[in-house]
Image (cartoon, rainbow, N blue to C red):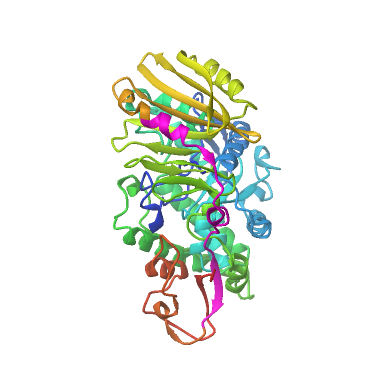
Amino acid sequence: MVIVINELFPFRLIQADMRHRLFTFTCLVSTIALLLGGCATEPSLYTGETGYYAYTWEQELKLGRESDAGIVQQMGLYQDDALAAYIRDIGKDLLQYSAIKAVGAPEIYQNTEFTFRLLDSDVVNAFALPGGYIYVTRGLLAHLKNEAQLAVVIGHEITHVEARHASKQALKRQLGQIGLVAGAVIGEQVAENKEFARDMVNLGGELFQLATLKYGRDAERESDLHGVEYAAKAGYAAAEGSEFFRSLDRISEKSGQSIPSWMSSHPDPGEREKTIQELAKQWSPSIGAQAPVVGQQRFLEMIDGLVVGQNPRNGYSDGQRFYHPDLRFQFDKPAGWSLQNESGAVYLTDANRSVMLAFTIAKESSPLEAAQAFISKLSIEPTYAQDSRVNGMPAYVVEGTVSNQTGTLMLNSTFIQMGDKVFTFLGYGTSASFPAQAQTIRGVAGSFDNLTNPDILNIQPHRIAIESAARTAPFKDLLPERLPPGTDTHDWAIMNQVELDQTIERGQLVKLPARN
């Protein structure tokens, strides 16, 4: 299971295997909380002059700290301590050359602690939260070529934090119409009642209460400028970062899409590819006579064995059933319905997107306690509330309605105890759409069962293997005939930052699918 959020890194780019998900995009959290009130005047880290922000720096620290817990819970951390420490060490090294650590930095910024995390997502992205929280995905790592490229990306995200781009953007939104978005998963599902829909899906609400912000050209250019500066000052060959922007362009081209319209406020990838090379030349004297670090071999050694594509251990569907090997459960997927698997939940919707079914794990220790908390929290008017059993497991079923100023939602929620966990199926829709789908929703909950098939329980993810080319040949000839599901030869060429027909010399290190 995994949740969708809104990105701060410039491109929302999806791998080919993401095309069949409920949406053809994934957002990564932009991060400014729902109450956009007030205006803070504090010094800029770059000029020392007074700047105007939606939040004080203390408020940004608090927002980041609170939102980070939700990110970790809902997106999940990639379980590789050595790789996570590697990213953390690079981030901390870059910080020593950043404005926030510079001698004479305004007092309010001093002693700010940064947190660097590796997320278990195959989306190619990186993003930041206010207050010093930087995230990179394993999907991003799979598409980088060396440590220098990673340093430029992390430096870019550090700049978003210290330049306070999110707070500045939030202030702009205060001056115009402020609209909170329910999030990528739920936003369009129940158009009549988005605010309530957000609360129902999340049941905790923190991440869906964040405003959607998109950085403009100036913010992205500023982050490119300092990202290259910090990487170069730390001794990296920062010009290497330009190749990664070419990779982003290729991912977009392969998906058959031009740059999305919302991205028109961002610099073009080709422009950035050229700009980063020029910026790197400006900073090259700062690293002295010592040869700049590319760090290709070290980087490739660190990502050897990296999971590529979706990880079936975290749940997957074969089109008819959804299986979760690690949590050892399964349930039906209705024919014609779309399924979105997230870290903290699974979402299903009918073909017309008129109703939603959300599957999560409750915080309470029994079905009755979970049902009581659910009814209380949402002020539900129950039409049915009763003990039940699902495939021999204790359960509790609640049906009812919730009304507010914008209308009425009908719902069915089933709470099922399996072992020490209580699993929740929450189906809901409007009074016009829900009745026709109610039986299907009940059927999904009723299909929940223990997973016992050893083949499914033992399924393993596909991984990257770093290998020396056994012979000189075009890259496409080095690939095996069978590739991991959801990937093709072009995907692997993009991951290696080479062309399919490009000649690879014998002994050259390449990323190939690991042999299972």
In magenta segment, residue 455: yes
Foreground residue among 27 and 58: 27
Foreground residue among 365 and 157: 365
In magenta segment, residue 339: no
Foreground residue among 372 and 160: 372
* Quarter location, residue 395: top right
Foreground residue among 227 and 502: 502
Q: Determine the residue positioned at 61% across, 50% down.
A: 117
Is 378 above or below relative to 118? Answer: above
Is 200 above or below relative to 20? Answer: above
Q: Is residue 256 left or right of residue 113?
A: left
Q: Is residue 341 left or right of residue 88?
A: left
Residue 5 seen in the current view: no
Q: Position of residue 80 (x, y in %)?
A: 65, 57
Query: Which range is magenta?
Result: 440-469
Is 199 above or below relative to 473? Answer: above
Q: Is residue 11 left or right of residue 162?
A: left
Q: Determine the residue positioned at 40% across, 42% down.
A: 339
Return the residue found at the far right: 111
Q: Position of residue 77 (x, y in %)?
A: 60, 49
Q: Determine the residue positioned at 41% across, 16% down.
A: 401
Q: Determine the residue positioned at 38% across, 66% down.
A: 488
